[in-house]
Image (cartoon, rainbow, N blue to C red):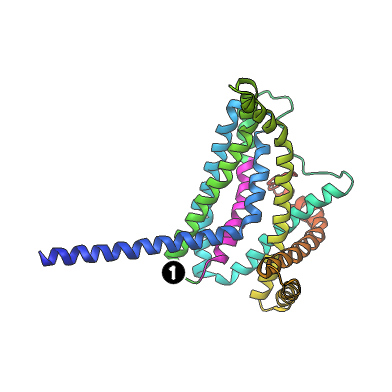
Amino acid sequence: MSGLLALLDDVAAIAKVAAASVDDVIGQASKAGVKAAGAVIDDAAVTPKYVHGFSADRELPIVWKIARGSIFNKLVILLPAAMVLTVFAPWMIPPLLMLGGAYLCFEGAEKVAHWLGPKHETHAEADASGPVDDPAHLEEEKVKGAIKTDFILSAEIMTIALAALPESGLAFKAAALAVVAVGITVLVYGSVALIVKADDVGLHMAGEGQSSVVRSMGRAIVRGMPGFMRALTIVGTAAMLWVGGSIIVHGLAEMGWLGPEHLIEGWAEAVAHGVAVAEGFVKWAVKAVVDGILGLAVGLALIPVVTRVIAPVAQAVGLGGAKGGH
């Protein structure tokens, strides 16, 4: 009997350790996922365009197909690649992270330039609103394009998350990245599903609501969705510039150039002490603004390089159209 009790005690102790490990994995995954906010919001803002022009009954199936492709990208391709880098080439992580940060800066700056400047050429992309001879084929092409776009964004997310994880064992990092991959995919594509169906829900409430309050709410949803989408795009753009700029600054520090990071932190500290109210928030806000301005400057500098050099080369080798203009 005493042996059985000892065994049960050991099992309970192991269970506690396992539970603590799971808590650690989820906690670190959550922190790492927050670091990828810019790419996540961009993903949620970009994806709804891929269902534009299709019938309402095809919207959720298309979102589900893209979500499955996103999970495949993250768990089957990018997660093993991240583990290989961690083991055999950890020195490549900071440069890859900075490359992802530069991409975020370019994406954000391109949107800002499009909003503020005269109309200029955008990335050509097939539009589902045009004549359609084979809707099934068009849907398949749209899904493939979305999954290709998702691969780029997922690579950014996974690289950012990997760099944000503390030093730990390979199994812990793999588990945390898997949690990030699944959690972010559910968050992004769950949000996209709600966004693309919001109009239909609003119309149903406006037309079939049992009370004037419900019908008014339905009309408000329908009227509010265009503004919501614009706000989501603006927030996503600001987040991309902030995260992209901060990644570049931190990457430079990781590679030995500490000056920019120390300078920005010094400015943030000085402003926070001068305000003397909510110093933690003020310090974060100043750093975010400076990182965002830096991200915008880097992105604007990259626009001619990408549009005149990288994009034509990618088009020539068949990699063009991975991410259409938005």
Q: Which type of secondary structure does the marked residue at label 1 adopt?
A: loop
The residue at the point 83 percent across, 47 percent down is 115
In the rendering, at what x and y percent does residue 62 appear? 58, 34
Residue 154 lies within the magenta run: yes
Q: Residue at x 83, y 51 (%)?
A: 113
Camera-side residue of 289 and 251: 289
Q: Which residues are magenta?
A: 145-166
Residue 3: percent from left, percent from top: 13, 66
Quadrant where the image shows the N terminus? bottom left
Q: Amino acid at mark 1?
A: Gly
Image quarter of the C terminus: top right
Residue located beneath label 1 in the image: 169
In which image quadrant can residue 295 be found?
bottom right
Q: Which image quadrant is residue 47 in?
A: top right
Along the line of sight, which residue is nearer the eye, 62 or 83? 62
Relative to 312, 177 lies left or right: left
Residue 252 belongs to magenta span: no
Quick check: 24 above or below 181?
below
